[in-house]
Amino acid sequence: VVNMANLTEDAQRDVVGFLLTEFKRFQCPRVPETLRETLVQDMQGLSVGSSVILHSLSEEQYDPQKIGTGGIALSGSLTATVRNTLESGAQRTAERLGVAQVGNRHECLESGALGCAAAHLVVLQDIAGDLLSDFEEEGILRPGQKYTARPIRTAWNVGRMESTPKYFVNAKIAVASAISPIEGPGFYENAFGDQVPKDSPENIEECYACKLFTEDQRRGAVTKTEVEVFLPLERDGGFVEVVDVCEEAWEEFRAENLRLLRQQGVFLPGGSESDEDLRYPSVLYALLTRDTSASLGLPANSPDAPKWEIYERGGRKYDYWRLY
């Protein structure tokens, strides 16, 4: 019996050299050092836990000046990762041969995902608490004030194959139902209405193929959101909306809105075009450039019409991405 966890580094690299090469494709460029970097990393590719593990295993040698290096020398670290990878690969192979599986098909990808979610959930709760406190202190929100319940504004419906169980509910609708104060029908509304990426999809990829939405469908989703959400908010106020950023629709106008913002000299989150800034949703830029004149019965581009802006108070700024 050979204990693979105690093999020398050179031997481990020879045995699973192919996997180490593949790991480099999915590792993070470096271990994140701040909460913001952690969140950015967790939103792209693998979970931050998995990408950090792969980064550590793939580094050539331990560097005492860099965190997360030399993981291959840690007894059992590589073999555990290889075992998880083989577990996922074996199940995928079995499925292709018609053998049903009940294990975790994505064992090799999910390490550390829940830990990151739990870690930054507390931070997000603190941010929400600060926001409500600031609203109350400024008189925007009164303690105990209640708003009329509005439907959760989601983006688009996922397609359903003929084999989908009759009572199946996808995760997005289940979450909307859980957080909406509305009980029964009407607790959520899609920007794309009842449209799906492809009618009668034949596989799971086609169910989620949102790139198949046409330009007219995307513009229709934008108009629906403007008419049902933005215009009433500007005209009447007095209520709160929870709105999905629906990048599939608003991205169509992103470049033009960015150009208008720069032209108007408006404060522009994302002006540096860094990787983080590019994560600002296109709908934010659309709101910052939006002319509210028509909503208030004023002539177009009236100087008396208020502009949408990112709320800030003191040293805190509540924009979409940066956590101050």
Image (spheres, helix red, strand yellow):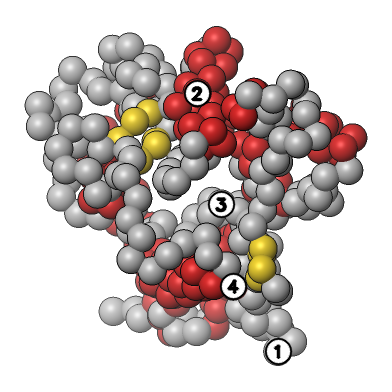
- At x 62%, y 29%, the residue is 296
Residue 25, compared with residue 77, is above or below; it is above
Horizontal side of 187 relative to 198 (left or right) equals: left
Horizontal side of 35 relative to 16 (left or right) equals: right
Q: CA distance from mark 2 to mark 3?
A: 33 Å
| Label 4 crowd bin: few (<14), some (14–19), many (20+), radius 10 Å | some
Q: Nearer the viewer, mark 1 or mark 2?
A: 2
Q: Nearer the viewer, mark 2 or mark 4?
A: 2
Picture disc at residue 64: 1
**Label located before the other in sequence (1 or 2):** 1
Helix, strand or loop status at disc 2: helix
**Label located before the other in sequence (3 or 4):** 4
The image quadrant of residue 110 is bottom left
The image quadrant of residue 117 is bottom left
From the viewer's side, name the closer residue of 92 and 111: 111
**Label located before the other in sequence (2 or 3):** 3
Q: Which residue is mark 3?
A: 44
Helix, strand or loop status at disc 4: helix
Residue 123, compared with residue 22, is above or below; it is below
Q: Which residue is mark 2?
A: 227
- At x 39%, y 37%, the residue is 153
Amino acid type, label 1? Pro
Q: CA distance from mark 2 to mark 4?
A: 37 Å
**Label located before the other in sequence (1 or 3):** 3
Q: Nearer the viewer, mark 3 or mark 4?
A: 4
Q: CA distance from mark 1 to mark 4?
A: 22 Å
Helix, strand or loop status at disc 1: loop
Picture coordinates of residue 219, whole percent (x, y): 57, 17
| Label 3 crowd bin: few (<14), some (14–19), many (20+), radius 10 Å | few
Amino acid type, label 2? Val
Residue 223, compared with residue 38, is above or below; it is above
